[in-house]
Amino acid sequence: MFLVLLSFLVTACGRDDAGKDAEIRGEEKAVLTHAPAVPPPISRKHATKVIVDLEVREVLQELAPGVQYTFWTFGGKVPGQFIRVREGDLVEFHLHNHPDNKMPHNIDLHAVTGPGGGAEASLTAPGHSSTFSFTAKNPGLYVYHCATAPVGMHIANGMYGLILVEPKEGLPKVDREFYVMQSDFYTKGRHGEAGLQPFDMEKAIQEHPDYVVFNGSVGALTGENALQAKVGETVRLFVGNGGPNMVSSFHVIGEIFDRVYGEGGVKVNQEQVQTTLIPSGGSTVVEFKLDVPATYILVDHSIFRAFNKGAIGMLKVSGDDHPAIFSGKQGDLTYQPEGGAIQAMPDDKAADKAPVVQSREEWMKHGARVYAQVCAACHQVDGKGVPQAFPPLAKSDFLMADKGRSIDVLLQGLQGPITVNGEKYDGVMPKLDLSDADVAGVLTYIRNSFGNAGDPVTVEEVKARRAKGK
């Protein structure tokens, strides 16, 4: 009899403990962050009511230098704001559709158990708000997105983000956490074509993206926008893929993932990983320790997406060198996106597709955009080139000595030995598929930047050299 009573008491205590853990105590407003920031880890040991306020905004922003796009967003930027809750929390979700918007929207959170992931309960017209609740039953890193018809268009215009349901026991402590989300965009104009670009449904259906990017735009994680960390720190990346079409081969050049939580689950399913797949509408969590200072490059290792469509980012790590691990020069400027120009060896034809540019100021702006997209990867942002590899354009005697020759180099390519500012170079510069206006603009910009001073290059001059070279 005593043993039976003891067994009953132990069982009852277990139920009380479970009940206390499942009990919703208090409430709080969710901290939402824009990428690449992540809300702080959850320290409480109990479930609570979490109120999430998320506003849909349709906004005009930059997709690439000189390229404007009308994004549909959760929170005003792409990707949508990061949401962090705890396993067992009761989430009261408020979706607000700004009155200036033109479209109805809703939200499908992959973390939700219920009709449409919340989509059926959240269809919201402009100027209205919808509310629904769900229990965060399943821990993991989940994608959310708009599911209003046509679903593909809403996602393609930027309507996706991540929600982390942190397990009750929490995640292992790390020094830094970052939010990175890949996606693909489809525009009427070609990659890099300036101006306001509308969404192209036909390209989306054919799965031919003009841009594949991290965090909503070309350059969102490069240069001054690079992620920052220090030697000796551990980093956790919450990585999502909004799609709508492309599967990501996520890789960090110069690092190895110590631990990978595959497909956004809460268990480490692999260690010492070089590249991990992230399906469209899926996620992953990767962790690694930083051993040496460098600029580490985040890419989709379907590599033309990185260097020609924009899927490139930077993690700049400062600190002391460790020659036993790695010795040699590290530099930021050798890792710049190559831009969107189609490259070919010198025998193809180029179409004149660039917009008409009027004033000298407009020529310089147009040329600067072309330079950033096409030339900076090799010749560097400051035009100083890379010693023994890519000749300088800054104060270049070779460039400035013969305008016609410079035009020919862009139109026809160049190979063989040359001397620039007293240094010998022997390499190959492929022909670039640039329009006459692109060639005139970028040469006008180069000839009047980086310490150079020269007369502009006109479209007529380019046309004449192109005809001569045929």
Image (cartoon, rainbow, N blue to C red):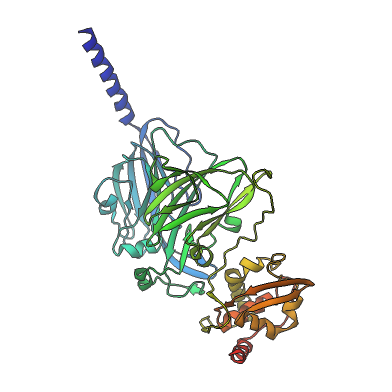
> Residue 134's quadrant in the figure?
top left
Where is the C terminus found, in terms of image quarters? bottom right
Q: In this view, does 149 lie to the left or right of 60?
A: left
Residue drawn at (35%, 33%) of the image? 47
Where is the N terminus found, in terms of image quarters? top left
Residue 74 in sight from this viewpoint: no
> Residue 100's quadrant in the figure?
bottom left
Instruction: Give the image location of residue 345, x and y in percent.
Output: 57, 78
Q: In this view, does 346 lie above or below 133?
A: below
Between 388 and 199, the residue placed more toward the observer is 388
Farthest residue toward the right? 422
Instruction: Give the image location of residue 287, x and y in percent.
Output: 50, 43
Q: In this view, does 109 lie above or below 20?
A: below
Residue drawn at (60%, 62%) of the image? 336
Q: In this view, does 196 lie to the left or right of 410?
A: left
Instruction: Give the image location of residue 182, x and y in percent.
Output: 45, 57
Say how many tags the image has. 0
Farthest residue toward the left? 1
Between 401 and 80, the residue placed more toward the observer is 401
Q: Is residue 4 above or below residue 14?
A: above
Q: Is residue 297 above or below residue 445?
A: above
Between 294 and 344, the residue placed more toward the observer is 344
Q: Is residue 418 left or right of residue 239?
A: right
Residue 14 in sight from this viewpoint: yes
Instruction: Give the image location of residue 77, x and y in percent.
Output: 46, 57
